[in-house]
Amino acid sequence: MLYLVLDTIPVRVFWKDTEGRFLGCNRTFAGDASFDSPKALIGKDDYDMGWKDQADLYRADDQQVITSGVPKLQYEELQTTPAGTQLWLRTSKIPLRDSEGRIIGILGTYEDITDKKQLEAQFLRAQRLDGLGSLAGASPTT
């Protein structure tokens, strides 16, 4: 039942050990990484993924969460897909703890917010153009 839930929620979910190796993920995350199943990612790290260009940044975030024990929530970052496309993500990472409270890795989630970021950029461009049009049409004052 847990995997059904993980594969149904509209966010990507993954978990890694303290060395940055993937221990699991949901099906949507596996698809983003161009793998057929979540099992195919187990033991791999960010350098094995299409987003290897951002691997150092992702691993630094992971280590910050692991060493501090403090979650990093709802931050925006870029990701390069295996096809080379850049996406905007809203990401959260929290420490993954064992039954005795020791940090044994991280649990991460992200959602693709690329469409939202593109709409925001279009809106800002339209506002700038509207502002320029207003300036161009303004009559000089004396």
Image: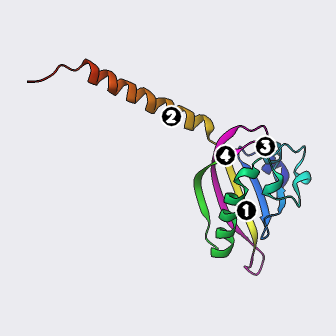
Distance of label 4 from label 2 (alpha carbons): 18 Å
Please provide the residue range marked out in magenta.
80-103
Tell me if residue 94 is in the magenta stretch: yes
Q: Is residue 116 positioned above or below 126 on the image?
A: below
Where, quadrant-wise, is the C terminus in this rendering?
A: top left
Residue 107, which numbered label? Answer: 1
Circles 3 and 4 in contact, beta carbons < 8 Å: no
Residue depicted at 18% across the width and 19% down the height:
139
Q: Amino acid at mark 2?
A: Ala
Left or right of 38: which side holds 82? Answer: left
Q: Are marks 4 and 2 in contact (CB under 8 Å)?
A: no
Q: Amino acid at mark 4?
A: Glu
Looking at the image, which residue is at 91% across and 52% down? 40
Amino acid under label 1? Leu
Please tell me how crowded label 2 is: few (under 14), some (14-19), or many (20+) other residues with Cα within 10 Å. few
> CA gap, disc 2 to disc 1?
31 Å
Q: CA gap, disc 2 to disc 3? A: 24 Å
Residue position marked by numbered label 4 in the rendering: 111
Q: Disc 2 marks which residue?
A: 121
Image spot of residue 114 (x, y percent): 62, 38
Alpha-carbon distance for marks 3 and 4? 11 Å
Dot 1 lies on which element?
strand
Q: Residues within 10 Å of mark 4 (few under 14, many from 20)?
A: some
| Amino acid at circle 3 | Asp
